[in-house]
Image: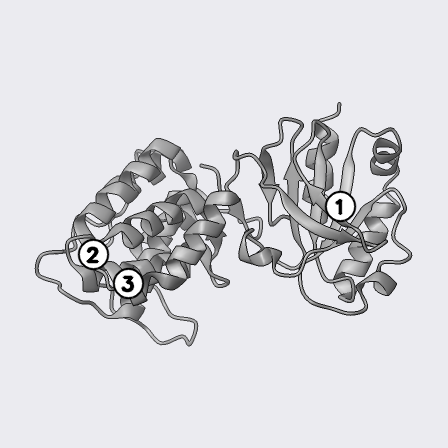
Amino acid sequence: MTYKLKTIIKTSLLSMSLLIATPVFSQETIQIAPLFEYPMAPEELQSITDKSNYLVERFWDSMDFKAKKTVDQNALNDAFRVYSVPLRWAEKSKSLASADKLIEKVSKNPTLMLQFMKAAEECLYGPRADAWIDEIYVKFLQSFVKNKKIPEARKKRYESQLATLEKSMLGTVAPEFKFTDRSGKEATYFPMTTPTVIIFGNPSLSDWRLSRLRLESNIALSQAVDKGQVNIMFIVPSETENWKVETSDYSDKWTIGYAPGIGNSLDLRTTPSIYVIGSDGKIVMKNVTPESAVNEVLSQIK
């Protein structure tokens, strides 16, 4: 499953069973009655993969989709959040098949489809999601925007998300984009044969300043950049007048640029938003920590 966890989540088999077996509470600690009885993986299944496979295949079996024309959105969000846990750990084919089966069930009911779209956004894509699972979320987006029963006005935000994600999926060739360099000239990024770390960030943020110092003081990374084995780019994606001043002391080995509005065409859900592009020009990682990006790019040159 090609997804990127926002945080490193350590999930034991016991906690998995408990999570699926017990009701879920909202962030306001108000108990929400489950829409249906959630399945529980058999004890004889030992591995987290086997348990997850079992759960994703059966999670929605107890929900009567024909009888429920609409549901409580908070209860649905909680159900979908529980469902998203085994989605992370199941075999990719099982998770994708489960999503397809679910989408088929709800697509005939535009009201329910909209509710599931909101739940998917909340639990797979949005800032409160425990994990971002783009391959699954894109399936919901594609079905939603193609659904002729959904009013066009309802599709606008999701059409925008889909267009951005489809250009930014892991394993796809990184898209070209234009930027202004510190000399004021227009330049174009395009995938090269050299592994590249692209950092889309705000140079004024204190957390990024600390991360930058760590990157510039990383001996292995600096040597790789000096030898031309790795490229580092820092792109300011939002409008600011002081970006040249704020980046004036950055390493002269880095490519520094300004591309306001790039977030409209690339998936930049974190600040900074960091991409790793492999030697084949494909996106290897995105929206990861600086440390993860460095470890990945250095592993590619060994």
Mark 1, Cα crowd under 10 Å, few <14 / some 14-19 / many 20+, is: some
Give percent across and percent down for residue 12: 46, 44
Give percent across and percent down for residue 59: 25, 48
- Answer above or below: position of 68 versus 232: below
Looking at the image, which residue sits at the far left? 67
Closer to the eye: label 1 or 2 = 1
- Residue at mark 3: 152
Give percent across and percent down for residue 192: 69, 31
Closer to the eye: label 3 or 1 = 3
Name which residue lies at 81% across and 58% down: 210
Q: Amino acid at mark 2?
A: Glu
Can see residue 208? yes
Could you give the CA–CA distance between mark 3 and mark 1, rounded to whole angstroms? 38 Å
Name which residue lies at 13% across and 63% down: 68
Q: Amino acid at mark 1?
A: Met
Q: Is the Cβ of the residue at disc 3 closer than 8 Å to that at disc 2? A: no
- Residue at mark 1: 233
- Residue at mark 2: 37
Q: Amino acid at mark 3?
A: Glu
Could you give the CA–CA distance between mark 3 and mark 2, rounded to whole angstroms? 34 Å
> Closer to the camera, 96 or 149?
149
> Closer to the camera, 56 or 271?
271
Q: Horizontally, is 158 left or right of 203 in the view?
A: left
